[in-house]
Each structure stands twice: as structure tokens, then as C-alpha cells.
Amino acid sequence: MATEVKVPELPESVSEATVGEWQKNKGDKVGRDENLVDLETDKVVLEVPSTSAGVLAEIKVSAGDTVKAGDVLAIVEEGDGAGAGDDGGDGDADDDQKAADSADEKDASEDKDQSSDDDQSEKSDDGDDEAVASPAAKKLMDENDVAARNVEGTGKDGRITKADVQKAIDAKSSSKADKSEEKSSPRGDSEREEQAVSEQADRQALADAPNERTEQRVPMTRIRQRIAERLLDASQNTAMLTTFNEVDMQAVMALRNQYKDKFEKDHEVRLGFMSFFVKAAVEALKRFPIVNASIDEGDIVYHGFYDIGVAVSSPRGLLVPVLRDADQQSYAQIESTIRDLGKRAQEGKVTMDEMSGGTFTITNGGVFGSLLSTPIINPPQAAILGMHATNEKPVVVDGEIVIRPVMQLALSYDHRLIDGRDAVLFLRTIKELIEDPARLLLQV
């Protein structure tokens, strides 16, 4: 029985999507709810899963095509795919798959015969032979230097799928980030890996070009187009000003170093700096509610809640998922939520609902080494806080020159709504709370 895989209902205000990378090839076996293809909209990336188990008998659209809700993307033949099509071509997919399976079994057999060869052996420490991997999974393992013994196969008879390999890669990256120690700035391995992914994507456009003067034209992604539109809208339709200050990070860093091990043991998440700034921002917003407000035509809308957007980078562009009711979340909850959102942003799994709303935004350019910058407001919000790199510098304390870890802060605000006095005092409040974190607990 053939099943049509269609474009799902798209998020509100989104009329069409662009077909991204196909995760399966024609003839591949697919499981129920297994992702077949990514669809990129101007807001989020959607995964389209198979609604039944079987064989991918036909692919109707190619990467880069534009589709709308309800359009047919592919045909999945349920079962083993033996009945796919009526034109005699239905056996091609099965033959290809059988050939691939046969090759996989042959490879697995050869691996067993050569188990004594250190260069060829893929056995695990306990002597078990590696599970058979699909061709796509093998390719992904080769590209990321992942051994089959380190991947748990979830397919039939323990077969390793592409999704299994990706899970192992994510776990490996997460482990590296967890083991890394942050020094004078809140930049860790996970942020460096984000930067590497982004830089590699930019270089890929010219990766195959010869060593000569050359150009290559590539279309902007829908998300990048949307980012451009929103930034241009912010610059043209707000009276944006920026005020700056600097904060001595010594007290927060000392507190973090004192309790980070116990914090991680008790809550199973690392204690970072972002949770301190989220808490400080919430307290400052309570004291200056105009900064938490927005303009709706001729009205000022005061928000009685604190939904804080946290800007995170992804291979597809900058995303701003929202921490709902940040004032009601503990430090551990904030850190856990940010970590989860950051990971899913890398995987393109942040939903539209998670990026909607927000009353105030925090962006941390310091993870990439930014010394000072002017963040752009995220409409319809009225302000955004920019964090930057922490560097040691001489400061005067009690009449003496001492070396302290100092971070530059920037607050961009819509001057139509927020006066300079309120903006300056708001930023100074954040500075004071960070420099004396005990005040966050006492709310003084």
C-alpha cells in the first residue's frame, strides 16, 4: 500500500517553505516517524517524518524547491516495498536496497575475518562484532570519525541508522563541552563548536572553487531573509539609541567557582553566567517596567510577566528562543532550558511557539570574542542587552589599582518609549546586581 508524505500545516503567517536536505534516498527503508526531509520556512526548520514504515518508493520534489501545505513530497510503500508501482520499475528500489544490505553483510563478515588486524578491527572492547550500518550511516560515521562500536543501533537486528550516528555525534560534542573549563570569559567549547559550524557553512560555498579569482552566487535561506527583514525594520522604525557600562565579574566568578561542582552534581547542569544575567535583567525590569513594555500603534503595552529572549547562533542563522516566566525559574531551570534550546537550535528543532513573544532580549557576543558592539532591538520589544567578552584590566578599587575581570555591557533601547535616564539607570542596576550577586537573592 502506497502512502503519500505531504507538507504539514505551516506555522501561522507562513505560506510556503523551501525543501532542504533529504535524509533518505529513493529505495531506502524507512521507519514510522523517521525523518525524511527538512523544510525551511522564514521562521523555523520543520522535519517531515514518514507516517508509515516501508520503503521510500518515490521522491516528488528536490532540494531547493518551493512547496506549500498539502503538497506531496514523497511516496512510501508500506511493508517491504514489493508492490511499489505498476510500471515494472518497482523492483529497482528493492534491488538497490537488497544490494546495499548484501554489501553491508559482506562488509560485516569481512570485519569479523580481519578482527586480528588492528587497523581494520571495529570490534568493541568486550569482543562483540560491530552492528551493520546503513550506507548513509557509514558515510556520516566516516565524515565525523565515529567508530561503529560507539554507536547504539536501533534498527532491525541492531542495524545502525543515520539517526543513531547523529545521536552519537551529539553526545560526543556534549561530552566535550561538559568537560571543558571556562576561564575568564563565559565562552566554552560548545560555543566554539557553534562558531566552527557557522564558519564552515560560509566557506562551503567556495570549497570546490579553483585557486583563482572567482565568485559563486547562492540564494539566501528563508531564515536569513527573515533576519534581514527584521533587522532592517528595527533600524528604520525605531528611534534606537545605545548606552554602555562595564561590570566587574569577580564576585560572580568567585561564587560560580565556589559552588559549580556541587551545583552540577545536584542539578545535573553546569552553572554558567547567563543565569545570573537573566536574573539581574528580571530584577531590573521589575524596577523599570517601561523597559519591559512595547508600543502597539498609539498605545504603550505594559507586560506583567517576564519572558526573556536569549539569542543563540545556529548553522541557519541567529535564533531567539524565549524563556517563559523567567522570574519564576530557578538558576538551574534557566541553565537547563538555555542548554536545551541551544542544542535544539543547532539541530533545527526549535519550534515557532518557542520563538514567539518575548518582552526583553539578551544576546552574548562575548562567546565569540566581541569586545564591544551595538545590539539591534528585536521588535516589538523596546530594549536588548548585549554581553561581551570578559577581559582582565586595571581598575581603581578603594583608591588602589587592581586587576579585575571586566565585561562591557550595552543596552540598545527605543527612545520613542524609553527615556535616556531610565535606560542608564536600568543598565546600572544590572551592573550593581552582578557585582554584588547577594543582592539578587535579597532583591535589594
Image (tube, helix red, strand yellow):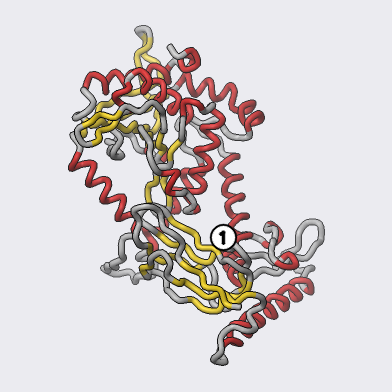
Quarter of the image containing the N terminus?
A: bottom right
Residue 72, placed above or below residue 440: below
Foreground residue, 99 or 226? 226
Identify residue type, mark 1.
Answer: Asn
- Is residue 65 something that shows in the picture? yes
Image spot of residue 214 (x, y percent): 27, 69
Q: Is residue 143 left or right of residue 11?
A: right
The spot of residue 293 in percent (x, y) is 30, 29
Q: Quadrant of residue 269?
A: top right
Residue 4 x %, y %:
52, 73
User: Residue placed at 62% from the left, 75% from the top?
Assistant: 78
| Residue drawn where x is 27% and y is 32% of the image | 412
> Is disc 1 placed on a helix, strand or loop?
loop
Q: Nearer the viewer, residue 79 or 341?
A: 79
Q: Which residue in the rendered view is the most extreme toward the right?
A: 127
Left or right: where 44 falls relative to 164: left
Nearest the camera: 104 or 425?
A: 425
Q: Quadrant of residue 414?
A: top left
Image quadrant containing the C terminus: top left
**Which residue lies most toward the top here?**
398
For the question of whether residue 427 can be seen, the reply is no
Instruction: Find disc 1 in the rendering and name its residue.
Output: 144
